[in-house]
Image (tube, coloured by chain):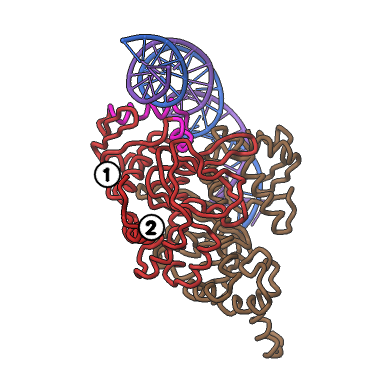
Chain colours: A brown, B red, C blue, D purple
Amino acid sequence: MPVTNTAVDLEQVRRQCARCDLRELCLPAGLESADVDRVDQMVADRTNLAAGDTLYHAGSPFRALYVIKTGAFKAQTVSEGGELQILGFHLPGEIMGFDALAGERHQCSAEALEVSSVCRLPYAELERICATVPGLQRQFMRLVSREIGDDHDHMAMMGRNQAISRLALFLHNLSKRQSRLGRSSDHLTLSMSRADLANYLGLVLETVSRLFGRLQEMGLIEVRRREVKILDMASLKELGDN
Amino acid sequence: MPVTNTAVDLEQVRRQCARCDLRELCLPAGLESADVDRVDQMVADRTNLAAGDTLYHAGSPFRALYVIKTGAFKAQTVSEGGELQILGFHLPGEIMGFDALAGERHQCSAEALEVSSVCRLPYAELERICATVPGLQRQFMRLVSREIGDDHDHMAMMGRNQAISRLALFLHNLSKRQSRLGRSSDHLTLSMSRADLANYLGLVLETVSRLFGRLQEMGLIEVRRREVKILDMASLKELGDN
DNA sequence: ACGCCACTTTGATGCGGGTCAAATACAACT
DNA sequence: AGTTGTATTTGACCCGCATCAAAGTGGCGT
């Protein structure tokens, strides 16, 4: 590894938020440059995870929230009866851990679906800085509220009794989120297994597999394992609307 | 109406939170007496609604949050395809409107299921006071987070593919919330119709009606229209766990 | 008391998606 | 290349819940 100028390194570390691709989606969105630096200083560390690694477990003490930098995660709970339910899939720019704000322990687990990295936001410091940086509190509330909105979308999807509507809605929704990240909206690489997706949609994995086939027969998509190409977005959206 | 001392009336108006039965569940929970008064002064008005009245519509401008004082509400969205989905039922002590924090408009509608009353919390003032009263911000976050937790419970319920588990889970959950309000945990008076409940559970109303019958045959509950008496809480819970 | 109307219950029938089972595809190892 | 293990697809069967239909119940206004 080449020797580099230490001063430059420190500067890079300190100004990571300012140069992050996600800064317009993340906490710093809309803040003054000086305030972005304060957020930056709060970030305890930036961690890398492999697929299958757990970011936090349900029941573990709540210390921090996590912003996803790269990769993808699933959030899930296990009921007392042992039934697992996937509550959501999370992409870069989204914050995980909001469910723990009410208590002192995480209510669900977060697991990386692929190689991922996150920024750790110690909650005690976040609270403190929110109280002094006026715009930050508001931006934070916007992100919490977006989480609630996403959950509502999930419920609306689970309410559909036609299974194919659920899958269509999921694909359309994922496509929108991809394009918000500046990625292609018609080519998706699913990071979750059929089993995960089925659980999320309230179906069994065989049904999901068959539905992908049906959507392909109908000419709306092209599927090959986890690669999905959307051919007819309008029809897909209409199918989701029922 | 008898003539009363004006000074006493003003005092009553000003100290409503301090004497409210819900003060330990609501925003003032855990605050100093002086801070409770500040919250009290923020409350714009306390409104009464009849069954079927709408507190706010999806798409209407977001100005305030509402704490339920008495009665019950349902929150619902309508998809672009016209499909209605009930997102939750809300009881006294719960705050409605969190989904709107991200934007400037309500994302769903809130409708009273029975005669109800609410306290109106103008959001601009709430933000301002949260910044100055240290405990209030935290209590506010706890309530937001509880909303997220409730939504997660709803999703976990929708994920069950046995319809009877969903109903059992709903009844058990409602029972817990009732007892948190100091009401009987084994006698429920449902404020929603079978159709509303079915929509919430992701079923059709006939199925819900039949399931109530089944639970009664099984000896777990006693039902008569909207009156439900829980006879065997343990079995009900077990059925919900699957 | 009466009729009206909304809500709920009950019945009959059919299909969508769950369940069980097996084959296939693919990645990651020797 | 061959082997192993996991993920996905495909097939056959059938049950639970949706659908359609009709009857029953209770509240409310006149």
Q: Horizontal placement of B205 versus C16: left or right?
A: left
Q: Which residue is mark 2?
A: B13
Q: Horizontal placement of C16 versus B88: left or right?
A: right
Label total for image:
2
What residue is shown at x 40% (from left), y 37% (from top)?
B114
Tell me whether circle 2 and circle 1 mark residues in contact (CB < 8 Å).
no
Question: Of the residues shown, which amino acid type is indicated by label 2?
Answer: Val
Mark 2 belongs to chain: B
What residue is shown at x 47% (from left), y 58% (from top)?
B144
Overall secondary structure of the magenta section: helix
Mark 1 belongs to chain: B
What residue is shown at x 47% (from left), y 35% (from top)?
B52
Q: Nearer the viewer, residue A210 or A71?
A: A71
What residue is shown at x 42% (from left), y 30% (from top)?
B194
Structural crowding at the residue carrying mark 1, measured as other residues with C-alpha within 10 Å and reported as few (<14), some (14–19) or many (≥20): some
Of helix, strand and loop, which one carries label 1? loop
Is residue B163 among the parts visible in the rendering?
yes
Q: Is residue B72 magenta?
A: no
Mark 2 to mark 1: distance in Å?
A: 32 Å
Is residue A198 among the parts visible in the rendering?
no
Question: Of the residues shown, which amino acid type is indicated by label 1?
Answer: Ser
Point out residue A9 in the picture as x, y percentages from the top left corner: 67, 85
